[in-house]
Amino acid sequence: MKKITLLLAFIGMISLNSCTVNEEQPINVQDNDTISEVWEYTRSFTPSNNFSNLIIFPRPIFTSDMVLVYRLSGVDNGVDIWKLLPETYYFNDGTLDFRYDFDFTRFDASIFMDGFDLGGVSPNFRINQVLRVVVIPGFFGNRTTNNTNFNNYNAVIKAYKIDETKIIKIK
């Protein structure tokens, strides 16, 4: 009986090993329906809005999409300086002064300030802040996460082939 069981096991192993499938991957396939987008908003953070803003997207995004939010923090020699949120500012002693942060759904993003004495934060950090929401389809985000420095806005724009002339400015 042991010999028959051993023989059947051996035949089963050989038959399972012989079933291989070689699928050829297409070369240079261009995906035209997953497009990265950027939407630009100008918002103020005041006591009347509880130092937060709900930004409505022009259209719903997919649940797999990745959302990055950048704040225009200055201009250097005519070049915009964008900082990725969350962004934190500290007092000289190293304790938290305030920070910008966000959360998002498929339809919107809530961008808010958090910290101590937000009303005392300079208006340069609260009034007419330019924010860019970068939506990266999940397909792209999963494939290139290890290669892209998300802290660098220009690297993200380049990596996902975003045409800055097509950025949608929303009032």
Image (cartoon, helix red, strand yellow):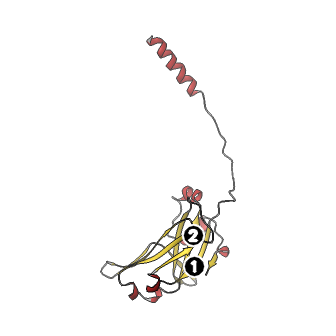
Pick the residue in front: 60 or 161: 60
Which amino acid lies under the numbered mark 1 shown in the image of this protein? Tyr
Q: Position of residue 92 (x, y in %)?
A: 32, 82
Quadrant location, the C terminus = bottom right
Question: Which mark is drawn over residue 41?
Answer: 1
Look at the picture and state if 152 lies above or below 14.
Answer: below
Which amino acid lies under the numbered mark 2 shown in the image of this protein? Val
Q: Position of residue 52 (x, y in %)?
A: 47, 79
Residue at (63, 35) in percent of width and height: 21
Secondary element type, mark 1: strand
Look at the picture and state if 99 lies above or below 22.
Answer: below
Residue 46 shows up from this direction: no
Which residue lies under the disc numbered 2? 134
Residue at (66, 71) in percent of width and height: 163
**Cβ atoms under marks 1 and 2 closer than 8 Å:** no
Give the spatial CA distance, label 1 vs label 2. Answer: 11 Å
Q: Residues within 10 Å of mark 2 (few under 14, many from 20)?
A: many
Q: Which label's residue is closer to the chain start, 1 or 2? A: 1
Q: Quadrant of residue 107?
A: bottom right
Secondary element type, mark 2: strand
Pick the residue in front: 21 or 128: 128
Question: Which mark is drawn over residue 11?
Answer: none
Q: Name the outermost residue toward the left.
A: 93
Q: Position of residue 123 (x, y in %)?
A: 46, 89
Quadrant location, the N terminus = top left
Q: Is residue 77 left or right of residue 51?
A: right
Look at the picture and state if 127 lies above or below 67.
Answer: below
Q: Residues within 10 Å of mark 1 (few under 14, many from 20)?
A: some
Q: Position of residue 62 (x, y in %)?
A: 59, 61
